[in-house]
Image: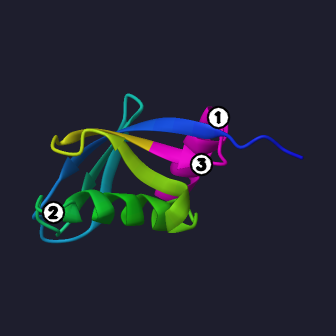
Amino acid sequence: MSKTTFTRLSVIATPRSHANQIVKWEKNVLHVRVTAPPLDNRANEAVAKLIADFLDLPKSSVYVAVGRTSRLKSVTVRDLNADELRARIERALKR
């Protein structure tokens, strides 16, 4: 039986943008833009979905753990350790 891994990812999110997109990966912080407004948790849900799609993970594996009302967020990613997460981000950015 394998142990479930949880890794934190620092994210700076810009809500109410023109498109849902990953902007850049800089100094271990992922910068994202989402079209959803920061109301009723909609922007946080959009951030989690965008990151899950970007990393090719199920949406249930990604959630905003800290920073629900802030642009700076700590997102938890399940089943990837820090090295795997970093490698997957860098690989996805090269696509």
Disc 3 and disc 1: Cα gap in Å?
A: 13 Å
Q: Residue at x 59, y 48 (%)?
A: 78
Secondary structure at numbered mark 1: helix
Task: Decide which of 73, 20 is in the foreground and name it.
Answer: 73
Q: State yes or no: discs 3 and 2 in contact (Cβ < 8 Å).
A: no
Residue at 25% across, 39% down:
67
Q: Nearer the viewer, mark 3 or mark 2?
A: 2
* Disc sitting over residue 78 in the figure: 3
Please name the amino acid that badge 1 sits on.
Answer: Asp
Q: Secondary structure at mark 3?
A: strand
Q: Is residue 76 above or below residue 28?
A: below
Q: Residue at x 48, y 55 (%)?
A: 62
**Residue 35 x %, y %:** 17, 69
Name the residue tied to disc 2: 40
What type of secondary structure mainly makes up the magenta span?
helix
Which segment is the magenta one? 76-95
| The stretch drawn in magenta includes residue 94 | yes
